[in-house]
Image (tube, helix red, strand yellow):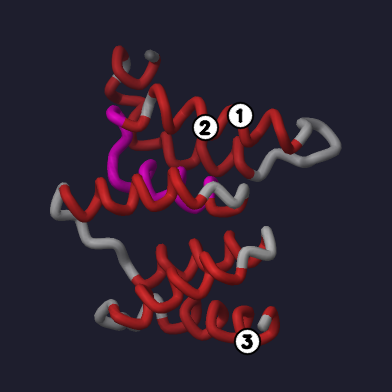
Amino acid sequence: KAAANLPHLRPTLHQTIASVALAPASQVPRQHVAAALRDLFQNARVVFDTKAQKALMIALARFNDELRVSTMLRSLVAQGKAVSQQTLAELVQGFLACRNLDAALGYLEQALAVEPSAQSATALRDAVSAVARAA
């Protein structure tokens, strides 16, 4: 509600999402973080800008939420917004952190199909290396 009523907060929502996702497990139980991310997906994603949507996708990947990640990815594509190799590589890393090799391979395949950029080369190389180590 705050983001909807206070539009000047929207440009920093991606930082808020990242902070929620990276909350130390010693302070916030993992299941509470996952519930908070699902709540953001369910109730707030319509007011998120592209950066916040991508941050939420990456956070959900770190919690192995394939369904919500794929829903958000399809939504971004339907809106005509490009998903970068960098973002896809971060999704790969997120799913690998949960030991979900199948999802990681699927997003790696998508990342390899995207036009490469100088910015994403390192992230893609790291993702490929991580998948190879996990396999």
Disc 2 crowd, CA 10 A, few/some/many (<14, 14-19, 20+)? some
Disc 3 crowd, CA 10 A, few/some/many (<14, 14-19, 20+)? few
Instruction: Write down the residue under mark 1.
Output: 35
Q: Are marks 1 and 3 in contact (CB under 8 Å)?
A: no
Judging from the image, what secondary structure is the residue with disc 2 in?
Answer: helix
Which badge, 3 or 2, comes first in the chain's sequence?
Answer: 2
Residue 132 got which mark?
A: 3
In the rendered view, does 12 fall on the left or right side of 123?
Answer: left
Judging from the image, what secondary structure is the residue with disc 3 in?
Answer: helix
Q: Quadrant of the N terminus?
A: top left
Magenta residues, as a range? 46-60
Give the percent coordinates (x, y) of residue 31.
71, 33
Give the percent coordinates (x, y) of residue 16.
51, 35
Disc 1 crowd, CA 10 A, few/some/many (<14, 14-19, 20+)? few
Q: Which residue lies furthest to the left in this view?
A: 80
Where, by quadrant of the figure, is residue 9 drawn?
Answer: top left
Amino acid type, residue under disc 1 in the picture: Ala
Q: Do the residues labelled 2 and 1 touch (CB within 8 Å)?
A: yes
Q: Is residue 70 above or below residue 20?
A: below
Q: How far apart are marks 3 and 2 (CA)?
A: 30 Å
Which badge, 1 or 3, comes first in the chain's sequence?
Answer: 1
Residue drawn 40% across the image and 77% down it? 120
Q: Distance between the residues labelled 2 and 1?
A: 5 Å
Residue 38 got which mark?
A: 2
In the rendered view, does 64 fall on the left or right side of 134?
Answer: left
